[in-house]
Amino acid sequence: MAMPSHAADERAIGRGKDCCGESHRRQVRPIQHIYLSPDRFSKIDQHHSIADKNWSQLQPNLDIFRFFKGMIAFRRAHPSLCRSRFWREDVFWYGVGRTVDLSPDSRSLAFCVHGASEADDDIYVMVNAYWQELLFEIQEGAPEDWLRIVDRNLPSPEDLSERGSPLQHLTYQLAPRSIVVLVRSKPKGQSVENSLTDENHRDAAKVP
């Protein structure tokens, strides 16, 4: 799969090149205003017209276009990712297990963004930057709590699912250089206070 990292890019405050689908995988004549948001993108001046884009590459890359479009929609649908401030106390960091690997040659990372402060769902992301498969242990909730939204190792359209696929286990085998995104729906009536885990869990999940 091309550009597996962009599933994680959507967690960022800015969308960057995702606004234009990485310029259709870096085809010729990329628009110089590639970092503009979609609403401003439509107002590009005539010197950099959207007509300059090589749209002939759209049909051969419909799977890439679909994925970028879906990830932008996913980001917009989750206030936790669109917030104007950093995650701070809402993010919990993990590795393939409970502990984050902070070594210089670390090639794995997982994190869970709790969405209660934004009236949002919880989002769990697992990143395997290694060239071999890695087995991740999901550190929060039960299998039935989570829906898999993204697995960049799967073929299109399974790589991004709007409805999500339920998990059967709290372990997930990530393919080499791939990313998986899970979503846990916020229970009705959940408050910020009761969404937080116990003190020991929070202390263990925070990076010093």
Image (cartoon, helix red, strand yellow):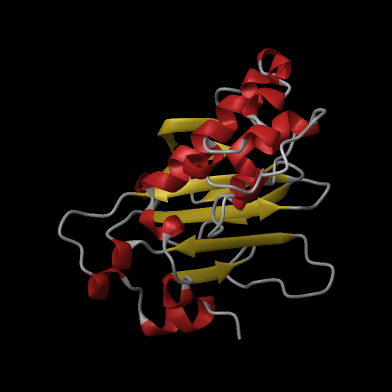
Q: Residue at coordinates 63% horizontally, 28% vertically from top-left?
A: 50
Whether residue 145 sits left or right of residue 177 in the image: it is left
The residue lying toward the viewer, choosing from 119 and 165, is 119
Residue 116 x, y percent position in the rendering: 30, 64
Please say if 11 is above or below 44.
below
List x then y, in percent, for residue 62.
Answer: 63, 19
Rendering coords of residue 100 (x, y %)? 65, 72
Position of 202 with respect to 208 (left or right) is left
Which quarter of the figure has residue 106?
A: bottom right
Side of 206 relative to 95 (left or right)? left
Residue 167: where, in percent of width, then height?
45, 41
- Residue depicted at 32% across the width and 56% down the height: 120
96 relative to 9, above or below: below
Answer with the quarter of the image where residue 188 lies. Answer: bottom left
In which quadrant will I find the C terminus? bottom right
The reply to whether residue 62 is in sight is yes
Q: Nearer the viewer, residue 85 or 167?
A: 85
Give the image quarter of residue 44.
top right
Q: Residue furthest front?
A: 46
Residue 148 visible in the current orientation? no
Label tally:
0
Q: Residue furthest left?
A: 189
- Which image quarter holds the N terminus? top right
In the image, what residue occupies the spot 24% across and 72% down?
194
Compared with 208, 148 (above or below) is: above
Residue located at (42% from left, 34% from top): 164
| Relative height, residue 193 to residue 8 (above, below) | below
